[in-house]
């Protein structure tokens, strides 16, 4: 069923270049080396198999009370509970979106709109995804960017300088989609706590 299983001389090619038929093949697709997994990747075979099975059998509208609707709702809620458990959160507070652009807009615009008594400033690292920067620019408050160092890691001293001036929200992504740097989120979170700012983490590349 998995459509992206390229072969070389009749043998599957997997992501580390070997041709073991057991392995998945995510990098060489139809004879082309595909290296844009940061933007989009072929589905994992297990996810694709599950998706097809669910689409075939549990297609009901989960808001309806008939049997198909209730079955779809049960599955949706068990998926929501499993995801919330993995992140240590409350299922009722988990919002599923169509993708990261929608999610970051909800997070940034919703946080600013819901916290009008806090300082009207948003602080973003200079290497946030354009979706985050656009949302913060559109939030109707001052939006400042803090630089990163030569390794693409946010400068905590610059972040602290901005937090001293007050902020409702800090946008700090987890892994950079452009240079791959991982941000020191524990340190960033500690600074946000110290200066009473909320923290939004775009983990689209690592979740
Ligand atoms: C870090 C980061 N944030 C947000 C997005 C936007 O994601 P989407 O294409 O799901 O809207 C991307 C897309 O690659 C991303 O890498």
Image (spheres, grey):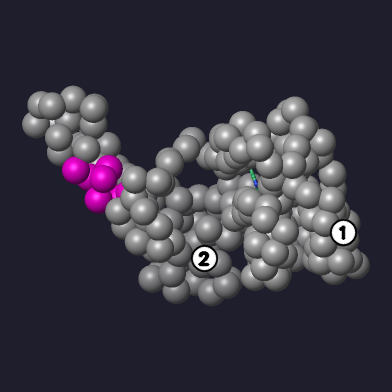
Residue sitting nearer the eye, 105 or 7: 105
Residue neighbourhood size for the residue with mark 1, other residues' Cα within 10 Å, grouped as few (<14), some (14–19), many (≥20): few
Expressed as whole percent of the image width and height from the top left, the position of residue 53 reads: 24, 44
Please name the residue shown 15% across and 38% down the image: 71
Residue at the far front: name it.
Answer: 117
Q: Which residue is mark 1?
A: 161
Q: Which residue is mark 2?
A: 13
Magenta region, main secondary structure: helix
Residue sitting nearer the eye, 174 or 31: 174
Within the magenta stretch, is there residue 79? yes
Residue 4 visible within the image = yes
Residue sitting nearer the eye, 116 or 72: 116
State which region is magenta: 74-80
Q: Vertically, is 27 above or below 187?
A: above
Please name the residue shown 64% across and 47% down the image: 39
- CA separation, marks 1 and 2? 51 Å
**Quick check: which quadrant has ligand 1?**
top right
Expressed as whole percent of the image width and height from the top left, the position of residue 172 reads: 70, 55
Please name the residue shown 69% across and 59% down the image: 192
Residue neighbourhood size for the residue with mark 2, other residues' Cα within 10 Å, grouped as few (<14), some (14–19), many (≥20): many
Residue 9 visible within the image = no
Instruction: Look at the numbered disc 1 and give the secondary structure of its residue.
Output: helix
Mark closer to the chain start, 1 or 2: 2
Asked if ligand 1 lies within 8 A of label 1, the reply is no
Between disc 1 and disc 2, the foreground one is 1
Instruction: Look at the numbered disc 2 and give the secondary structure of its residue.
Output: loop
Expressed as whole percent of the image width and height from the top left, the position of residue 180 reads: 73, 63
Residue sitting nearer the eye, 43 or 187: 187
């Amino acid at each position: 069923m998995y459509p992206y299983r390229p072969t070389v001389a009749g043998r599957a090619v997997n992501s580390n270049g070997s041709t073991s038929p057991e392995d998945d093949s995510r990098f060489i697709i139809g004879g082309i080396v595909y290296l844009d997994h940061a933007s989009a990747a072929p589905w994992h075979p297990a996810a694709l198999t599950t998706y097809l099975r669910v689409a075939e059998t549990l297609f009901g509208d989960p808001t309806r009370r008939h049997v198909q609707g209730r079955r779809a709702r049960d599955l949706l809620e068990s998926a929501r509970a499993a995801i919330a458990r993995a992140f240590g959160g409350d299922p009722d507070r988990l919002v599923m979106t169509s993708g990261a652009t929608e999610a970051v807009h909800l997070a940034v615009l919703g946080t600013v709109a819901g916290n009008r008594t806090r300082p009207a400033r948003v602080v973003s690292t200079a290497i946030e995804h354009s979706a985050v920067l656009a949302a913060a620019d559109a939030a109707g408050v001052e939006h400042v960017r803090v630089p990163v160092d030569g390794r693409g890691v946010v400068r905590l001293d610059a972040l602290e300088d901005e937090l001293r001036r007050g902020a409702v929200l800090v946008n700090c992504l987890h892994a950079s989609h452009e240079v791959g740097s991982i941000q020191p989120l524990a340190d960033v979170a500690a600074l946000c706590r110290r200066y009473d700012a909320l923290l939004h983490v775009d983990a689209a590349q690592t979740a």
